[in-house]
Amino acid sequence: MKEEKIRVLKLSWKLLKFKPVLVFFGFLSDILFFLTPLMLSLIIREIFNKIEHVSNFNISIWVLILLLIPLARAFNFLADAIFFVTMMPYVKQAQILLRKNMLVQIFSLPGAEALTDTAGESVSRFRGDVEEAIWFTYEITQKFSIAVFAGFSFLVMQKINWQVTAYLSIPFTIMIFLVLFSKKKIIELRKTRRKAAGAVTRAIGEIYHSIQAIKITNSEERVLRYFDSINEKRRKAEIKDELFVAILNSIYRITVSVGIGIVLYIVGNSLTNNTFTIGDLALFVGILNSLADFIWDIGDFIPRYLRTKVSYSRIFKLVRGRKRESYQKIEEKLVNYGPVYINKSYTSQKSDLNENYGTLQKLIVRNLTYIFPDSNKGIENVSFEIERGTLTVLTGRVGSGKTTLLRTLLGLYDKQSGEISWNNKKIEDCSSFFIPPRTAYTPQVPHLFSDTIKENILLGLEENNIEIEKALKLAVLEDEIKKFEKKSETLIGPKGVKLSGGQKQRLATARMFARKSDLYIFDDLSSALDVKTEQELWRRIFSYKEMTCFAVSHRKMMLKKADKIILLKDGKIEQIGKLDELLTKSEEMQRIWKGEI
Amino acid sequence: MQSQIQMSDYWNLQKKYLQPHFIKVILLGLLLLSMTIIQVFSPFLIQWYIDLATENIGRILFSSTKKTLNFYAFLYIILSLLQFTIYLGTVYIGQDLAWSTTNKLRYDLTFHTINLDMSFHNRFKAGEMIERIDGDINTLAQFFSQFSVQLLTSFLLIIGIITVLFIKNWIIGLVFFGFTIFAFILIYFLRDISVQNWEKERQSSSELFGVIEESLNAIEDIKTNDAIDFTLNKFFDKSRYNYKTFMNALFKELYILFGSWILLSLADILVFSPSFLLFENGKITLGTIFFVQMIVGILILPIYRIIRQVQQFQKAAASIRRITYLFHIKSEIKASGTKKIAPGAIELEFENVNFSYIDTEPVLKGVSFKLNKGKKLGLVGHTGSGKTTLSRLIFRLYDINEGNGRIKINNIDIKEYDIKNLRSNIAYVTQDIELFQASLRNNITFFDNRISDKKIIHIMFDLGLKEWFKRLPDGLDTIISSDEQGLSAGEAQLLTLTRVFLKKPNLVILDEASSRLDPVTENLVKAAIDKLLVNRTAIIIAHRLETLDNVDEILVLDKGKVIEYGERKKLVKDKNSYFYQLLKTGKIEEVLK
């Protein structure tokens, strides 16, 4: 597919306008910052002129030395301080905005197919790529400030001596081009270097991962030789990169020296007849030094631009998921302004559920179809009904499409066809409809937050409306929680208690029960729970007669208890009915019952 | 061992690795020295130039004077060219030293640690070794080659500058001597004023991205629990915290900027005030003032550099400590045996073997059995019963402690065999395959280039990997890695089998694939294994009952104890045996739970 165009400058401009006041004053502070070396050079010129008694200004040299120099340097400090309270807050806030828009956009995608890459890789786009994109917006303003400085410097210098200025422009122009063209090479070298360094890191990991195999096969020495060859490659890449940067560095330092040499060469005569003073010489030396630094900065622009473009394309690919929305639409969503809550807590702008549908009497699914884009697996033309107060069990062999069916029903996959209705009313958007208090759901592998057990159950609900203890008990988790010192305030995750797979699943189940819902949907609890715990869990659930449950399972107990069994095979419904019916009618059911599959 | 790093530790390490590069070190020192000299000398040219030009103010220049002036300008350019050429030399030699020495250190540390026994590797996982071998040694890289030299030349430069200033005029010399001391104190006190704040910022930022990662992982949970707002709230909380810590760190930076404002303003004031007075009294020339201004500009840099090196030293000290700690660990496996295993199938005997890893429950309790030449033993037991440990002991990945039983091969304690010979006589087939990001060839031969491609391909085709192999873009040169080439469980097992067929083992330990293979691969694996087992003694860790049809003996292991051991033929008929139960119910895991 053809790559769509990314308009980096347009996006950047839109982002800059997010906080126009901060950006404007940040820009001014930058100009002040870049102009101070010029001011300083002018003051030092005056000092030398005073010493030489050729000054036209009627102020004391002591004022220049003791007052104006510190003052000019103070401007530099002041510029930094202003920058810190204007441009930096803008940069940080714009980052938050971009990240928030990315998150919101990802959450709007069908949940089970939102990420096209691993979460770890996706996070790197929230981190590095967002930073790159926002810093670039600042870079644009910075280049303008540098241009202002360069312009002023040129004006001052040519006013003092246009001839010298004209000569000086030659080496500096050459340097600008050198810097511009070499920056690409730097990026290239840096890439090779990073790759070589990455190879070393990876090799170490691989060696210690396969240590047992290495020992068993007596390969220690050979593996070390291999390791050495990778190290050697890296050494070369590192030296090459460092040396190239050093060469560039030298070139621009040499340009300054050559510039000074040129000035000395030309002004010999003028110095003796006082048309060019020692102060002028000091001024030229001062300006040349700072000019070189800034040209170095300007050379950065093109490679920065290219890198930013890559970052945007990585961000775009992340947030459009598999839906392949046009870049233009995504652009708008990404730079959509909104509060970034740096001083106060976030407040939801969500409107209440549309309650017109009423409490569940009957859920009807007609011809539901979802086929995975990159294989021809999935579910096809699935139709069934769920009635209030019943237990419906979804069963079938591994890969028959059970999880896909649940996810498509819940809008976690975008259904390709079919109709779902709640109390005979058609549902438009499954994803926003199937949420508590209508349905609650536990995925096969639930994901929890590194937070307290309580927070993981509440997920933002008001605590006093929720019966946490009851939910934990229903999920057969109360005994284990009691053993924790801080009970339900216990922190879980890497910084706290590490829960087992079964505990995680029961916590997710408790989370589900905490939300009083019309329909409870379970994806195979048996994958992480042992038989006894699972039986106890269901026993507690069944003690509530009015609960409506829809569960994936192939446990005998569940199949016996079910009011209705939906048997899936190869993504299609094989049979629907009670257990004894199915056992007589369906060979597939018999196999599942015998545990052959 | 975790004590404070001694300077002697540092010197020893540095000496050991720098000694082979003695000449380069000397050369680097010389280059840096000459660079310093040029740096101090160049401003003299400008002074002479100015002095000569101002002497002649108001006069017409003689052509000889004009020539001298031009000569100074010319020399100034030449010297700066020379200076930067030397600079490039120092960068090259410095980098070369840094990487040659640390590569050697990396090699040595890897060499040392991979030869340590498995109890070390259980304690230090791959991630930590990356931190040591890559992270810590990287910290040392620049430091190692440059610390002494940089420190030396920076001091030299400072001393050179102050000496020159003293020679020019003792008052100016004294003033800048004082200034240098003041600068050191100021920079030293400001050096890590913001470090803690930045540390906090990093912390908050990793928390923020932690929340984002969790949210992305939990999209399914979030959407179905109507928790998008909750997630956004968490995101904004962490963002806000990150914003605050960032701004705090930034404000701390202002102290540093304020410090350099004081320093730079002071430098300017000190350049002009005394000089102006001395000039008015005819003590110094205009050129000298210019000279002082230029050279003081150079003075501040080495001060910063010295302080940075000192900071680096503190960081490096921690790394050196961790590295020397690893070097001090000794392997517990004594590789002192010299005997060689006689060719042909072997006899294997466990004599009342007890074993436990450090600080854990005993994993094997009084395990005894004797497997005759060419016999096959089926090892059954559920996860954690000690099956894997049992096989590891045969390889001497761990050693049994004195008095805790013996393992004998052909009636000789395995500790008496040469360890390499022992390992090359045993093959281990598992479904877990760890791959290197390297060519397929290297992944099969483990970088043994004595093995011909023909032989490898022959074995692969024999094992039925022809179709898979044909699909690879570059044949044996195809770079494979665990994440990219998507090996199925069956293919992984076939690859390990290829590795095994390259050597001629006398004992085969086979950890059967527990996941289900597709029928075609399953048959391939089965055929290959049958072929492998011919005329060899074997231990088969079985996950499926069919596998046990072909073994001679059965050993059932439960919580480290042998609960049943006997000939398969007899056990099949014994209704009280576990094995009989197994065959009846058909499920290994359930019977043994």
Image (spheres, helix red, strand yellow):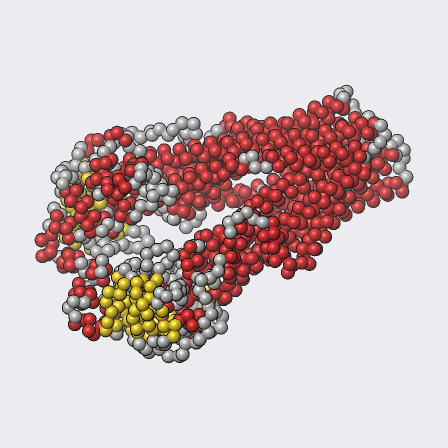
Residue nearer the viewer, A138 or A69: A69
Residue ranking furthest to the front = B403
At a point 58% along the width and 52% down the height, the residue shown is B9
At a point 54% along the width and 42% down the height, the residue shown is A304
Residue nearer the viewer, A75 or B465: A75
At a point 18% along the width and 37% down the height, the residue shown is A518
Task: Confirm whether residue A574 shows in the render.
Answer: yes
- For the C terminus of chain B, give its image quadrant: bottom left
At a point 67% along the width and 51% down the height, the residue shown is B90
Q: In the picture, residue A323 is in which quadrant?
A: top left
Residue nearer the viewer, B133 or B512: B133
The reply, left or right, for residue A91 in relation to residue A148 is: left
Q: Residue B279: x, y in percent?
A: 82, 29
Q: Residue B375: x, y in percent?
A: 29, 75
The reply, left or right, for residue A578 in relation to residue A160 is: left
Tally of numbered tags: 0
Compared to A381, does B341 lie above or below? below
Q: Residue A555: x, y in percent?
A: 17, 52
Compared to A317, does B387 lie above or below? below
Residue nearer the viewer, B112 or A386: B112
Task: Confirm whether residue A195 shows in the render.
Answer: no
Compared to A510, does B439 lie above or below? below
Residue ranking furthest to the top = A58
The reply, left or right, for residue B204 in relation to residue A464 is: right
